[in-house]
Amino acid sequence: MSLSKLLPSRPRNLTDLETSQRPRERILRQGPEGLSDSELLAVVLGSGNAGQTALQVADSLAGSGTARLACTPARDLLRTRGVGPARAAALAAAFELGRRAASAPGPSVASPEEAWCLVADMAGLRKEHFRALYLDARRRLLQTETVSIGTLTSSLVHPREVFQPAVAHSAAAVVVAHNHPSGDPEPSPEDLSLTRRLRQAGEILGIEILDHLVVGRGRFVSLKQRGVL
């Protein structure tokens, strides 16, 4: 018996895989972060051809590295077996969208409501998370970072943990937020004290703390609107 008969055959198409293992379904279920470069490329390709699966074509493309592939002109992608004009155009379009997204300015965070849109998901967290939104001089988002994760009732945060990333990202201002797993966003005395400490540290560094949002179930409290900042 030949070795090829002992080895399991690779599926010809993505749809031949078990549903839970298909890259497209995995992206919809858990996001694209856990997929390999080849699997992401296979999703863009969509299907294989008579001689290769989409995953096999994707393996060939990924072999040169995605950074190099992203800079390859569409006409040169045609040299890869299994890549015709439609697939070459789709790949070039996907990489161009990625470049544009990377260079585009982030969303505006000029009001508590705009900040709330970026942290509202914290309401469903079972532990207290402390998150910082780092902004440029025009109040546009540069980066979002989870500074710390606490217990069911508290989150320990030191100002240096908030401002180290601010310096690294050359941020001009910061909005901070944390959730109350209880669902009640009413600030505690500790929340007020921390906010004042962050404001004082920001004044020394020249990085303004614009607001501190306390996130509850379906609503929030802005400590700037409360007059704490």
Image (tube, helix red, strand yellow):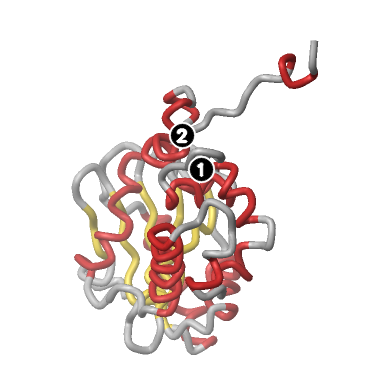
- Left or right, 78 with reference to 107: right
Decide: is 162 above or below 26. below
Residue identified by numbered label 1: 54
Front residue of this view, candidates 65 and 158: 65
Please tell me which residue is depicted at 44% across the width and 36% down the height of the picture: 26
The reply to whether dot 1 and dot 2 touch (C-beta < 8 Å) is yes
Please tell me which residue is depicted at 47% across the width and 72% down the height of the picture: 198
Please tell me which residue is depicted at 35% across the width and 52% down the height of the picture: 188
Please tell me which residue is depicted at 42% across the width and 55% down the height of the picture: 190
Q: Please rate how many residues cluster around mark 2, counting C-alpha atoms within 10 Å: few if below 14, some from 14 to 19, many from 20.
A: many
The mark found on residue 14 in the picture is: 2
Q: Please rate how many residues cluster around mark 1, counting C-alpha atoms within 10 Å: few if below 14, some from 14 to 19, many from 20.
A: many
Q: Position of residue 43 (x, y in %)?
A: 44, 46
Q: Position of residue 201 (x, y in %)?
A: 52, 79
Question: To which quarter of the image does residue 152 belong?
Answer: top left
Front residue of this view, candidates 16 and 211: 16
Decide: is 113 above or below 48. below
Single out the residue that lies furthest toward the top: 1
Q: Earlier in the sequence, mark 1 or mark 2?
A: 2
For mark 1, give the secondary structure: helix
